[in-house]
Amino acid sequence: MADLIHVLWGRVLTAGQELPPSRIEIARGRIERLEPASGAPDADISVTDGWIAPGLIDLQVNGAGGVDLTSAADPHAALVQVAHTLGARGVTAFCPTIVSSPLETILERIRAYAAQPISGGATSLGAHVEGPFLDPDHSGVHDKNLVRAATQAEVERWLAAGQPAIVTLAPEQSGALEALAQLTRAGVVVSLGHSGASSQAAQAALAAGASMATHLFNAMPPLHHRAPGLVGALLGSHAVLAIIADGVHLDPLIVDLVVQRAGPGRVALVSDALAAAAAPAGASLLGDQTVISDGRSVRRADGTLAGSALLLDGCMRNVRAWLPRLAPAEVVRMATETPAEVLGSRAKGRVAVGADADLIVLDGAWQVRHTIIGGAVVRSAPVQVRR
Ligand SMILES: [Zn+2]
């Protein structure tokens, strides 16, 4: 039986702002009261060095702790294992992400990874289906043989299996705009990525309801001053820009430029974590591909960069270090409220009356000291100090 938390006290980071020291009261898994207080003698947790923040929300997690969510033989067991690894590191909700796969695998994983609470671990917010409707020339580490044109028949099969939270597609590919319309009508977030789209094709998809960018700059042509392409269209739009701030996928200066352009309300930090994250260096699987981690970056044998070896807490610490001009609450927003907003959730990503009691305690060095999910303390695994 997990320990339930009734009262916390400390400085609070929420909605891009730092609240004065406050007493937070939790009941039935929700925040019931939140009020300024100079102290709280009845607090289960008092934070004197650091902050109370919303739990971290990661929109793109392929795996962690040695488990790959696309290929694991038992998807439910894989989901539980990854959820526990994430919970120990401050991530309280996530989108289990699958790379381009045969139809039957996608259907099975959409079902298994449907939105659900997981006892002692991070809540699933529903699957992120990353591919297979991608540009074969920007497929990155996805298996080119599995990348295919979108068809309404395939999307119908997906929607009959369940409700994915996010689908990444390349808008210039055959059938993509029809699939986009079908998915957004069903309430699925469509994110643009793994694409060589022109700015015009990208803008058409944004006008048709695409609302997010998948790992902006990675697996798409760079910004060119005479051919702004997908990157230019996304930067110029109102879409939420997901970025991998692991120190490998993007130069910190690019992260700074993106945040300056779009602001913390439109930038979502994602880990794009692989099985190799929170696991020893060496070989692991991503779908049907073998990838090799050196502990910092993860690549296929041919050198193609795969996802990340870092979880979201580490990405957040990177951004904190790279962009000292940002207030702590602005950094936290990009890993909490902004990703929650992509999915239309007001229950998560905020410390507010009525919101879910998904909270973390950060110490002065931005290490996650406690993770609380639905009002219950999640036991922490040993925390890696590596950024
Ligand atoms: Zn990708």
Image: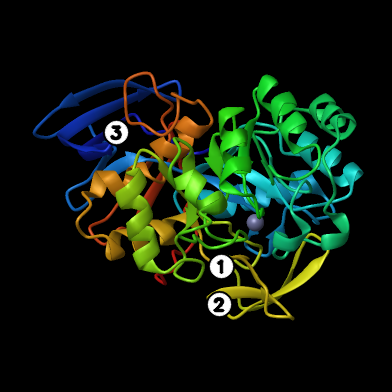
Give the amino acid type for the residue marked by disc 3 in the picture.
Answer: Ala
Residue wearing tag 2: 295
In the displayed orientation, state which residue is furthest to the front: 226
Which residue is at the front of the view, 314 or 167?
167
Classify 258 as above or below 360. below
Percent across and percent down for residue 14 are 29, 35
Q: Secondary structure at mark 3?
A: loop
Q: Residues within 10 Å of mark 2 (few under 14, many from 20)?
A: some
Question: Image check: 235 left or right of 281?
Answer: left
Count of marks, rendered view: 3
Which residue is at the front of the view, 145 or 230?
230
Q: Is mark 3 within 8 Å of ligand 1?
A: no
Task: For the residues labelled 1 and 2, say whether their Cβ atoms are less than 8 Å apart.
Answer: yes
Classify 316 as above or below 149. below
Residue wearing tag 1: 309
Percent across and percent down for residue 167 are 68, 39
Task: Kindly indicate the quadrant of the structure image that contains residue 252.
Answer: bottom left
Classify 255 as above or below 40. below
Residue wearing tag 3: 15
Q: Quadrant of ligand 1?
A: bottom right
Give the amino acid type for the residue marked by disc 2 in the picture.
Answer: Gly
Q: Residues within 10 Å of mark 1 (few under 14, many from 20)?
A: many
Which residue is at the front of the view, 51 or 245?
245
What is the CA distance from the residue labelled 3 to the residue labelled 2? 33 Å
